[in-house]
Amino acid sequence: MENRRFILIALLGVVLFFLYQAWQKDYGMKPPPPNPAAVAAAAIDDDIPTAPKPAALAAAPGETPAAAAVTEAPAVAKRIRVETDLYIAEIATEGGELRRVELKGYAVSKDKQDQHLALLDDRNGRYYVLQSGLASSAEPLVTHKTLFHAEQDDYRLVEGSDHVDVVLTTRQAGLEAKKVYRFKRGSYQIALQQSLTNTGTAAIDASPYVRIARTDYKNGDEPRFASTFTGVGFYEQKEPGRDSYRFVKTKLENLPKEPFEKQQQGGWIAMLQHYFVTAILPPPGEALTLSAKPSQQHGYLAQYVGAAKEVAPGAQASFDTGLYIGPKLQDSIGKEAHGLELTVDYGILTPIAEPLFWLLEKLHKLTGNWGWAIILLTVVVKLIMYKLSEAQYRSMAKMKKFAPKLQDIKERYGDDRERQQKAMMELYKKEGFNPLAGCWPLLVQFPVFIALYWVLLESVELRQVPFVLWLQDLTAPDPFYVLPVIFGITMFVQQKLSGNTTMDPMQQKIMNVMPIGMTAFFTFFQSGLVLYWVTSNLIGIAQQWFITRKLEREETAKVTLAKR
């Protein structure tokens, strides 16, 4: 009876967990709409960041610092198209902004396989772009509004080359500037170099800035019955002067109340969403400022401003910044920048989820199919827990054996719960039986189950992957409800094998309805998760049958031995 109660409570706990997830997605606590005046006061200036002036820089007497006067670049802005093995991108000559980035190999949704997912986008009312420029403590230099010139309108990664460079140039009174995007073969990292030549008569100071501006929207297919994160993440230095960092993230909707600005050495900042990330990766160890706040014009901004350099007359300075625009691939994203692997966030169950994914990936390499990998993962988990499962099924078998005695105790003491419990405890002690011994396998298995839920939810490697026949997306619910129905049947069989002779009528009714309720509940979840649970149940039924037969043989042997 204690086992039944524990199982019931545990199952209800899982149901409540996922109901909470769904409620958070649709009705969770959200901050009230910000006061427009407060947002305007807190927002980053959408025009040009202000950079601190280097201490060593001072204009000589009678000299006038160079300023960004009227541009000599073409008056009409246009788009430059770039195509590589991984990207189809668009760069605007106005500001040299990266306005659109389509990811090859990642469809918008399962039913739109011919459309690449656009991670950066400025079409159809959306706004998610990457801007860059050179700030100054005095007048603006080269900004994301400066008009640039490009030699051609179309760039392609040609056969035999490992990269393609898009070169943008501009000339203004007192300076010449160049912006170069380098797209690399087989890499989601883009190198951005901004350089400045001082053609004036006075020294100037320049600081690079790169920022991501976006509105709050979802692109691509979003999972049902789950809440995913969209917001800003940055790698924060814990203490000045120490090489110790932590990953911090804030939802976009919380930025009006929780804007931040941090001056530190090293680190990075990124816009995060389900499966994908756009990150600004400054040179390691650089003195910089990272900030994220509401934008006056475009929703929200995540910004990096680098250290200033003095540029003497006739001298040149260059500034390098890395960009990562793509999926959160767990085997490679951490190689792009230290700590970037933390953007794959499994929450508090990360210590369980990460080894699960590692093993799942190894099994995928072995089978070539994520569905079979999930099945093999379930087998491995059940083998590891075999001894615990054996204890559970032994407990259930003994409970069935003691059922008549327990029923007799209930009838003898009627409504006297205290005497009932005392008599039961005496029986357990006499027979050397712990009714809670069968609870531990469930206690261990549920965190594994929840961790696998997060693995299936957060791992882009499993996005839209098929299994067999009708199961063409393991991260989406079963379209024909076959797996949930099989799950309900296996749960019913397990209950019958376990027996429920010691349960009162109300508990028995609840347990009888539970397979139906769980079947309906599992229709909302990823088919990969239900596949794991169905496989676990089938193995559990086989284990339960085997262990029960084994116990029966042991009891027969004891009786035979006693008769001799």
Image (cartoon, rainbow, N blue to C red):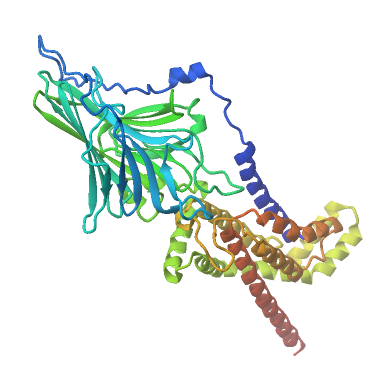
Is residue 155 positioned above or below 306 on the image? below
Is residue 189 positioned above or below 535 on the image? above
Name the residue at 38% across, 41% down.
Answer: 100
Report the front residue among 18 and 485: 485
Instruction: Say which quarter of the image contains residue 525.
Output: bottom right
Name the residue at 69% across, 60% down.
Answer: 436
| Left or right placement of residue 107 versus residue 429 in this view | left
How far across and how far down the image is residue 99, in percent?
36, 37
How far across and how far down the image is residue 533, in percent?
61, 63
Judged from this view, the residue extending furthest toward the front is 76
| Left or right placement of residue 176 versus residue 93 in this view | left
| Left or right placement of residue 260 versus residue 445 in this view | left
Instruction: Say which quarter of the image contains residue 200.
Output: top left
For residue 432, say whether it is visible: no
| Left or right placement of residue 449 versus residue 357 in this view | right
How far across and how far down the image is residue 42, in percent?
44, 20
Q: How many numbered dots are placed on residues in this image?
A: 0
Instruction: Say which quarter of the image contains residue 419.
Output: bottom right
Q: Which quarter of the image is occupied by the C terminus?
A: bottom right
Name the residue at 52% across, 55% down.
Answer: 110
How far across and how far down the image is residue 545, in percent?
68, 76
Name the residue at 49% across, 43% down.
Answer: 219
